[in-house]
Structure formats: C-alpha cells, structure tokens
Image (tube, rainbow, N blue to C red):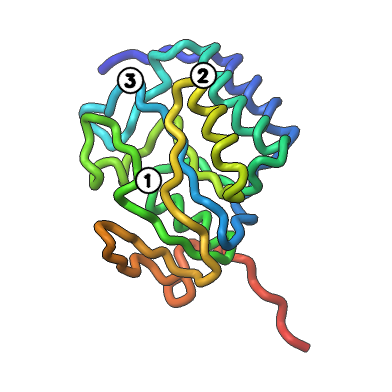
Amino acid sequence: MPSFKYSWGFPCLLSRRLSSYLITSFDAQPDDCLLITTDFRRQAHPRYPFWNAATESDPARLRGDLELLPSLAEAGLYHAGKDISMGGILGTLLMLLETSNCGAVLHLDRIPLPPTLTLSDWLTRFPSYGFLLSVRPHHVSTIQSYFHQRHLVCEAIGTIQSEPKLLLEQLSQTEVFWDLQQHPLTGFGNQKPAQK
C-alpha cells in the first residue's frame, strides 16, 4: 500500500478561496451545454474505482487547476456544477439534474476516456479531479480554452433539457436511463409551493 502525503495547508487555502463564491447544483437550465472537465494525468487505482490525479501531482499545479472553477464562476461563465463523486458521471449528473428540476441528454460517444479504461469503467469511476458544469452555449469555447491551457480535459458531452429524464444516446440510439419524476434519486429536488 503506497503512503500518500498531503499538505494540510492545501485544504485550508482551498476552503478559504471557494467560500467567496458558492458553486451551486440547483441552477442548471434547459438548453445549457453539459461539460465535463477532468485530468487524465496519472492513473487508475489498481484495486478501487478511483482515478488518482492528485496524490503524486505538484501541489501548486493542483491549486491552480482548482482555482479555475470559482474564478470562471465569478466571471459569470457558468452558473451550475457538481464535482464527480462516488456515483461516477451518471450518478453525479442525476444529482445535478434532480436539484435543478431538469433532465439531460448525455451523449456517451462524446465522453472523453482515459486511454487505459473502457466507457463502462469510466462512467463509474471517482476522479480526484472531475466536474460537470452547466454552461450557456455561447460560453463553451471560452471555458474550454481556460482548462485546455492547463492541459485539462474539458469537453461537451450533453444538453440540459426541461423534461426531468436522463436520456443516454449512443450510435444514434436513445434510451431513457432514469425518470426523476417517477423515481426521485435523493429527494433533494426543489419542491413547488402548494397552490392556495
């Protein structure tokens, strides 16, 4: 088992920086473009479904990579996002959609993959640096340029829609993966006030 060394100053600095702008998962809007940003440097964990792009990386570079997120949000370039958690891309997207009362079409063929993983493996991985962003279409190329300058992956993989369903599209075929109206995932969706 490798021993990982962390700088305790890093999470303190990060928490202080992010506190000036809250990146919410409640504001994805229909017709937004869904972006994924992640880091393919480093490797998959040999035993667990993690993608480790942090523990052996330069701390200063990691801070700069993370700094992009609140900086771009403060500039008004995107208005909703969520870090990819243990639920992987699909589970994280469902949580983002549920809290925003939206749905999405996810284009499986457009999801960028690390060279050592299959699509099914990558969909359920927990990346140490991975985020889904909900972005107005006219801001997509600008956001991508900032991430690409830091050698990070940032690609458009879907579209937010008003109907609260997650649709998966691959090879021109589309299937309903999850209907949030029929099957809430967490129950954290916005509730409409009762009519008087």
In the picture, the disc for residue 77 is none
Q: CA distance from mark 1 to mark 3?
A: 18 Å
Instruction: Label 1, secondary structure: give it.
Output: helix
Categorize mark 1 by other alpha carbons within 10 Å: few (<14), some (14-19), many (20+).
many
Q: Secondary structure at mark 2?
A: helix
Residue denoted by label 1: 88
User: Where residue 75 appears, x then y in whole percent?
Assistant: 72, 35
Depth check: give the residue in front, 15 or 97: 97
Which is more N-terminal, label 2 or label 1?
A: 2
Residue position for label 3: 42
Give the side of residue 42 with respect to residue 194, left or right: left
> Which residue is drawn at the image coordinates 72% and 36% (left, top)?
74
Give the Cα separation between the discs numbered 1 and 2.
Answer: 21 Å
Please state which amino acid type lies under the numbered disc 1.
Answer: Gly
Q: Nearer the viewer, residue 174 or 46?
A: 174
Seen in the picture, residue 12 relative to 51 is either above or below; the reply is above
Q: Which comes sooner in the sequence, label 1 or label 3? A: 3
Residue pointed to by mark 2? 62
State which tag comes first along the sequence, 2 or 3. 3
